[in-house]
Each structure stands twice: as C-alpha cells, then as structure tokens.
Image (spheres, rainbow, N blue to C red):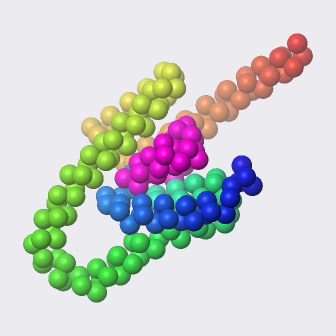
Amino acid sequence: MNGKRDKKDLWILFKTMFVLSACTFGGGFVIVSLMKKKFVEELGWIDENEMLDITAITQSSPGPLPVNASVIIGYRIYGVLGALTAVLGTIIPPMAIISLICVFYTQFRENPYIATALQVMRAGVAAVIVDVTWSLAKNVYGMKSVFYTGLMAVAFVGACFLNVSAMVIILTCLAIGVINVIITLPAVRGGKRHESAC
C-alpha cells in the first residue's frame, strides 16, 4: 500500500500532523481523537479497527503518545519516510510554542486573560476526551466479545474507583492478551489445517 501512495501524500501527512499538533490542548488522547477523525473518517487512509490498535500500541509504549502515534501512522501511510515526516510535523509546533512560553513565562503565568482562557480550554479538552473514550468503548463493544467487553469494564472500574495505576492496568491487559494469543493460536492453526485437508 505504501508504494501506491503519491509523494503529495507526504505533504498532506506533514500538514495534517502539523495542524493537529498545533491545535491540540489536553494531552495525547485529544490528538488521537483528531487523528481518527482525519485519517479514518476524512481521508480514509486507516480503518477504524486499525486506529484502535494504534491507540493501544501508542498508549502501551514509552514516550509521548502523539509522537508514538505519528510514527505508526506515518509508517503505515508512506514507510520510513512517512514516519519521519509525521514525527517532524508533530514535534515542530509544541517545540516552537513551549520555547516561546519559556521566554515569556512570568508574563504568561501572571496574565489573567491567559489564565481564564486556559480554564475555558479545560472544558473543551474534557469534552474531547469523553468523545474519544466513548468512541473507543463502542469499538470494543462492537467486537461482540464478552471477554474484551468484560476486560474493558474491569479496567474502567480499577482506574476510576479503585485508583489502580494506569501502568498496572496496561501491563495486566498486555499479559492477558499474550496469554489469550498463546491459548487460541493452536486452535486457530488446527482449524486452518483441517480446512486445507478438506
């Protein structure tokens, strides 16, 4: 699929990641939601299940979530060059903005207008995060798997009500996933051998 892409897609990729990164406030899940809307719904470069997998991988990997996601999405679209292009588009806006804020940090901190604007932005960020959570939950429920739905519910209860660390939840789900693959893989292979014999 990478070979079928035109080089103009690199520019679209860079521009998209640059704009998303420049306009994202509130952390990684916000930009993942915007990436989903852009790459899945508008451009159609990635399907919804793949975006769910990318979100799981980026959340489970060390490093900033937007950068991790941009590496995978860029590579998926245009190989190594796409990954480098996407990362570049992702890191330039925050580097420039943070550098500017560092120079004028005292003025930013004491300015009542900026403080009010940041408080208002929190409400918008909360809405976007709820939208992402709802969308991801619908995707998991759409798999029609009692196992995955139950695991999602247990993870939610652990994070929200029992104050279980996100890292513990991620590592536990990773271990359960590996065990699930080890258990189900022989059965899947056996079924394929049976079909080929027939």
Residue 131, image quadrant: top left
Horizontal side of 46 relative to 140 (left or right) equals right
Q: Confirm whether residue 83 shows in the render.
A: no
Q: Residue at x 55, y 61 (%)?
A: 12
Question: Any magenta on residue 6?
Answer: no
* 174 to 82, vertically: above or below: above
Query: Which residue lies at the image location 51% right of the left edge and 44% below the top edge?
Result: 40
Instruction: Characterize the magenta stretch by its predominant secondary structure.
Output: helix
The span shown in magenta is 30-58
Horizontally, is 99 left or right of 2 in the view?
A: left
Residue nearest the viewer, comparing 121 with 159: 121
Q: Nearer the viewer, residue 172 or 137?
A: 137
What residue is drawn where x is 64% and y is 53%?
A: 76
Judged from this view, the residue extending furthest toward the bottom is: 103
In the rendered image, residue 175, in percent from the top left (x then y), is placed at 56, 40
Q: Is residue 55 magenta?
A: yes
In the rendered image, residue 145, in percent from the top left (x then y), is placed at: 51, 23
Task: Please tell me whether residue 33 is drawn above or below residue 179 in the rendered image.
Answer: below
The correct choice, above or below, for 81 with respect to 39 in the image is: below
Q: Position of residue 74 (x, y in %)?
A: 60, 58
Furthest-top residue in this view: 198
Task: Quadrant for the C terminus, please.
Answer: top right
